[in-house]
Amino acid sequence: MKLGYTILPYSWQTQSFYDLPVFIQGAIVVSLLAIGATVLVFLRILMIRVIRFYYRRRGQRLRSQIDMLIMEHIISSEPVRDIATIVFLPTAAFQHLPLHKRWARRILVHRLQKYRSNFSGSVSESLRQLYIALGLQKDAARDLHALSWSKKVGALGELFNMEIGGYESQALHLTQHRNRYVRGMARCYIVKISEDHPFSFLDHINAPLVSWEQFELFKIITDRQGLAIPAFAKWMNEQYHPSVVSFSLKLAVHFMQFDAIPRMIALLDSPLVAIRAEAVNSLGKLMAQEAEDILVMRYSYEELPVQIEILKAIGRIGTGRYLPFLEYIFHTSANDFLLRKHSAKSIERHRFTAGIEIEKLLNTSAGDEHLHLQHALNPLIKY
Amino acid sequence: MQNITWQFFQSLYENAMFVYCTAIFMLYALLAMLSYVGVLNYKRKRVLRDQVSLVASPLTPGISVIAPAFNEGVTIIYNVRSLLTLNYPRFEVIIVNDGSTDDTLTKLIAEFELVQVPYAYYQQIPSQPVKAFYKSTNQAYAKLLVIDKINGKSKADAVNAGINAAHFNYFLNTDVDCILDPKTLLKLIQPFMDEEVRVIATGATLRMVNSCEVDAGMITRVRPPRELLPRFQEVEYIRSFVLGKTGWSMMNAVPNVSGGLGLFDKEIVIKAGGYDPASFGEDMDMMIRMAAYMCREKEPYAIRYVPETLCWTEGPSTLKIYGRQRTRWGRGLLQIFGSHFKILFNPKYKRLGWIVFPYNFFFELLAPIIETVGILYYIYIVVTGKINWEFALILLVFIYTYSILITTMAICWDKITTSYYKTWKEAASLCLMAFIEPLLYHPLVVFFALKGYCYQLFGKKHSWGNMLRKGFKQQVALPSPHK
Amino acid sequence: MKKILVIEDDTLMLRTIELILKKQGYIVDLAANGKDAMTALTGNHYDLVITDIMLPFANGFELVSKIKNSSTNTNVPVIIISAITHESSITDGFELGVDDYLRKPFVPSELVLRVNRLIEKTAV
């Protein structure tokens, strides 16, 4: 093979490409590839810009149309009445939208979800009925079987956001999917929609329930109306994944399940520091007076994170019986900043019941102790 | 005989160079591919992970935002106000006044109705003593804490003081003159919440604020820098963040989270000993020590990168200040290898010892030296007439075209997540940089890195951290269009 | 006619609230960020302010404190509408003198009822 005659130096014209040293051959090939690839990348940049521009223009027009329709037919005709009785079917007006096109349906669905994230009650219910009446769930139902995980998640998310029932069995199946995001969204769907067993998923969790998933599930569970809330004490058990235990502790606190207190106390024997600390924290938030003695008794054997939680809990429970204990810790923990800080804060929590005593403590203390008390008592400092 | 030995070394050198170049090019190709996957993954997940969940959840963890300020009187009020308007349900803003000699503190006190408060300060990591703590009497500024400390001549010292005073388990390390995206905290905390392994730090892309339109501490319109030097830096940052760090993030081998913007797990930072005030590259030094700590504790960890621009910072626009900054970086890099050399190829440190350190040693630390030696060698063979001009030309074209490709890809990947520039012209002006950068800008990078190494090796012991920051300030204090 | 200022950075939300309130016969002014809100508040008297917390330029709490310390709008009732459910954020709001706190998503008719009640209360 001879190299080109026009652009290359004269001496090469006499040489064959194959006679060149290997590294020069490599360099030539890679350079040519790099030039080709650079051109492709530039085209890609160009394409991204063009496509974005086009999509934006196309979407804008439709979006403002949709907004007008929703304002007119749903928001401004919102009656103050019982959600259960709403039958909403102004679909004729919406039929004029180019809904035979997938992109238009997508934008509409997106818009409906956005309105629903801002408004609840009858507006939200009307939007849901509009969605069903226009048959928009068909796309999502199809995407449940899509190959790409992100499409599956998108579809589940849409059905979840629009509260469309009827796909429980598919969703249940997807809770075992190998992709974490699919599993997570399927769980969300079940918890929000399922009538019979919204909480059964907690039994089968063996990979950690990461914080994000906990946030989402917590929100769904606490927002869902008419849901029969189970006793979360059931999952406060060694046999469940620690993240499940921790999640059920948070839920039990939110729903003020005082019946869970004995289980929480039992968790104090858990070998995991994090679980013990969280159990103490929950006892404090539930103001479990019956736990006070046990917490104080355990204090000296515990590790630092749990000790801090015990001090906080005593402050939250706030019966005043253990104010001397807090004062004792406060005085004796000169070498441990956090213990002193949290005992001071918990002492401060007694200011309404033991104001005089705290005042006395403040006046008699000096140096570091005084500073800690001042810090805790200063209303400008929140933390 | 001498001639034969010389020829032997010459061919050895040339072969070594060939291997080195091939390795670096293959590595970049790998990073380009990985970062592409990373960016696409991020884009897909961004749709799924709606930040509303974080805003609305009562369980969202709190964050302490720490921003040291040294003689920032001109812009301090706007900058603090913009930090206070970050979108996040639970955070505090800690401004560390690092012994400013101007009116930074008085301005803060007046604007935010501050009063001195008694504050129990936990000196867990070393820093210069704190003189006073200030909180606002106005409930609207309850999130703000100002601490006034003795100047420690380094950002590290000031951040350490902030960490000591911080309440929450996560802290954001930023500069008071950086402009943050309102969603910064929401986006940076997400990887911490969304991974099964413990995430110890997250970072995001930084960009130049130089020619952006800024109104009261908020970016209202993004523009690439008009001046050449900052524009080169913009391209360099995009390449290093979007292509480099995103790629490393896919391998869980992020070498560094920039000092301009990073969210950290406070516990690990403290256990690793906090920032080192004597370090010239305190951000990378901190990251290395955090990762090393996790390795020693045998705890799995991750450092993640968000391929989106969340922070805009002023890039030096004069050669003098730019040179100072880069010399310092060069010094810092060499210093890190001086103090952590034992990590290199140490099996105990896994990825850190086998990926992060070797890469940074061979392709970051040694690259300027190798390049310089290469140029000297070129000159030598030109002078002695041993050069094969055709081959030399081919190799130069090869390096040039490849570097253009890598930069163009970085610009493209960056566009995939968000279009930052409004007009075609702006986007094109940045792409153009890919062609002239290797010729004009790259020599500067090499030169100042070498200068830094020399300073580090041959004395120049006195610390001049604050001189650098003053330099920045003088530049900001000039009536520039955006401040 | 009673005048209401609505401060919210989400245009969709802003326009819907405007529509809801206009239907009730209120005059509605809109501000999309903290800065516009400040200008609106210095020049005009309002009978009620509805604000979000997370806003550009100045957050909702700062606006509330400005309102409560201003000369023209000192006694104006304020409703906060926010997605934030953190207890501390709600208590912060009430400590600043906010009159009502509405969580997103909310029922529009509920907003109307609360607005009517607050306006009647201050009118007396």
Image (tube, coloured by chain):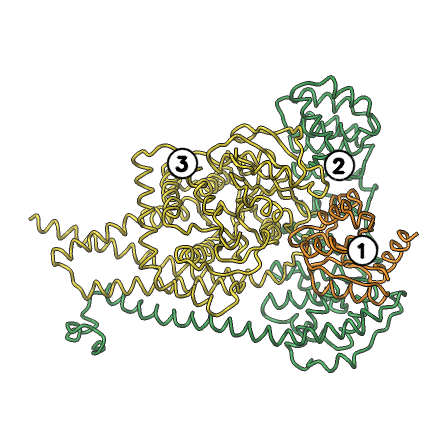
In this rendering, does residue B330 appear at all? Answer: yes
Marks 1 and 3 on same chain: no
Along the viewing direction, whichever of A267 and B90 lies nearer the viewer? B90
Three-letter residue code for mark 3: Trp
Given contact means CB atoms under 8 Å apart, are the residues at marks 3 and 2 in contact? no
3D distance between C-alphas at marks 1 and 3: 55 Å
What color was chain C assigned in the picture? orange
Say which element carries label 1: loop
User: Which residue of the protein is positioned furthest toward the left in this rendering?
Assistant: B1
Chain assignment, label 3: B
From the top left corner, tell me how far across and down residue A80 is, in percent. 89, 65
From the top left corner, tell me how far across and down residue A190 is, in percent. 74, 61
What residue is disc 3 on? B464
What residue is disc 2 on? A266
Three-letter residue code for mark 2: Ala
When asked about the image quadrant of residue B122, the answer is top right
What color was chain A assigned in the picture? green
Q: Which chain is yellow?
A: B
3D distance between C-alphas at marks 3 and 2: 58 Å
Crowd rating for badge 2 (residues with CA inside 10 Å; few <14, some 14–19, many 20+): some
The residue that appears at 42% across and 37% down in the rendered structure is B279
